Image (cartoon, grey):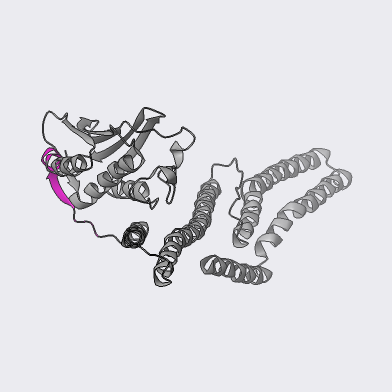
């Protein structure tokens, strides 16, 4: 909010200074007025001169010669002045009005022109500048909205588990809990909420660093097949412990170098698989990861047989704090930042992430990382 207020203040001071400056520099408008009205006066004067020549000079041939000469000169002069106004003064007037709009903070301006001289190039450059300023202003407004939404979501997400912890602690302190079993249950709920708060803070810290481009990456040129083989062994052990069927397919014919931070890509893959586990079926959940090459990109495809994602929600799943259905999460609470973080991490490597899903059949996330040629 302060940033936008300061932005408007700068525009106000600039506009006031601009008007004050224009008050003492009216040369352009004076010249334009002269060209616009002076040519009419000059034309009438020359017309009168021709009339007098025809009337007073005795030699009619000489009079006609001078009259034709003056008429041709006047026609050329009028043509020159007309072109001068059309190609210079009128575009400059439009440009001045557009600059005044920019000074007021209105970036949605465009100067229409059909000239191909230097002023045409200048106006084209001005239109491009106005377009970039408009885009920059829209980004600032969107950033401000995202910041407000982020604060609101953080407040909501922290308030719920903190209120739960406070309630259970008060119940224990007030002696409401009579049996050791109930006391143990309450303590586990408190621990569960404390773990969630800690995870939320970690995700927020990571996401804020990504958003401000202040996260340190330790890039290395790694053989993607070797890297994925080692990483999938870790995931296989972890998922089998949680009764999840896991399969890894290496579909590459040869190894390729990829410039990446192994820890960050692991985190992106972990967030996607973790999302599949949290929202997946209670029984017979399976996750399949496949590695293959396509169009100079190493593709990491992660498929699950979960409930899938509704078509109307598919465009929003990479938005921060977006959740499909809180009631579906089982043993872990979702922070709503996992997929947003995964997307940021992959794009920081010059890659891309896509998703496709069919309700009732599962989802497929594809991470694409550029290989070194």
Residue 142 in the image, given as x and y percentages of width and height = 51, 54
Q: Residue furthest right?
A: 55
Residue 105 in the image, given as x and y percentages of width and height = 60, 60
Evaluate whether residue 351 shows in this view.
Answer: no
Which quarter shows the N terminus?
bottom right
Residue 116 in the image, given as x and y percentages of width and height = 54, 42
State left or right for residue 367 relative to residue 208.
Answer: left
Which quadrant holds residue 180?
bottom left
Which residue is nearer to you in this view: 197 or 185? 185
Which residue is nearer to you in this view: 80 or 193? 193
Say if 137 sits above or below 166 in the image.
above
Say if 367 sits above or below 124 in the image.
above
Evaluate whether residue 358 shows in this view.
Answer: yes
Q: What's the residue at 11%, 35% (across, down)?
A: 255
Q: Which residues are magenta?
A: 216-229
Residue 223 counted in the magenta span: yes
State left or right for residue 215 relative to residue 229.
Answer: right
Which residue is nearer to you in this view: 349 or 6? 349
Which residue is nearer to you in this view: 129 or 140? 140
């Amino acid at each position: 909010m302060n940033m936008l207020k300061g932005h408007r203040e700068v525009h106000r001071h600039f506009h006031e200074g601009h008007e004050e400056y224009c008050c003492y520099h009216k040369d352009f408008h004076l010249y334009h007025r002269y060209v616009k009205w002076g040519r009419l006066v000059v034309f009438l004067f020359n017309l009168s001169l021709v009339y007098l020549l025809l009337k007073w000079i005795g030699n009619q041939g000489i009079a006609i010669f001078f009259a034709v000469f003056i008429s041709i000169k006047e026609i050329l002069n009028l043509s020159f002045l007309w072109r001068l106004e059309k190609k210079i003064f009128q575009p400059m007037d439009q440009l001045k009005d557009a600059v005044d709009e920019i000074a007021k903070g209105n970036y949605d301006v465009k100067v229409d022109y059909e000239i191909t001289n230097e002023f045409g190039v200048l106006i084209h450059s001005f239109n491009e500048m106005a377009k970039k300023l408009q885009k920059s202003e829209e980004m600032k407004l969107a950033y401000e909205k995202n910041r407000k939404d982020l604060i609101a979501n953080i407040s909501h997400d922290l308030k719920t588990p903190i209120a739960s912890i406070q309630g259970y602690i008060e119940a224990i302190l007030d002696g409401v809990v009579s049996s050791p079993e109930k006391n143990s249950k309450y303590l586990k709920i408190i621990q569960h909420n404390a773990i969630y708060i800690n995870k939320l803070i970690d995700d927020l810290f990571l996401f804020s660093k990504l958003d401000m481009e202040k996260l340190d990456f330790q890039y290395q040129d790694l053989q993607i097949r070797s890297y994925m083989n080692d990483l999938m062994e870790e995931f296989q052990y972890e998922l089998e412990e949680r009764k999840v069927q896991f399969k890894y397919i290496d579909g590459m014919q040869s190894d390729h170098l990829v410039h990446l931070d192994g820890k960050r890509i692991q985190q992106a893959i972990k967030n996607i698989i973790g999302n599949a586990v949290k929202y997946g079926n209670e029984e017979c959940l399976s996750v399949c990861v496949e590695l293959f090459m396509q169009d100079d990109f190493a593709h990491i495809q992660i498929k699950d047989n979960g409930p899938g994602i509704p078509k109307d929600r598919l465009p929003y799943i990479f938005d921060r704090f977006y959740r499909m259905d809180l009631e579906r999460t089982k043993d872990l609470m979702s922070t709503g930042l996992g997929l947003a973080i995964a997307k940021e991490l992959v794009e920081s490597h010059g890659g891309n992430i896509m998703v496709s899903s069919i309700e009732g059949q599962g989802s497929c996330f594809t991470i694409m990382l550029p290989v070194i040629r």
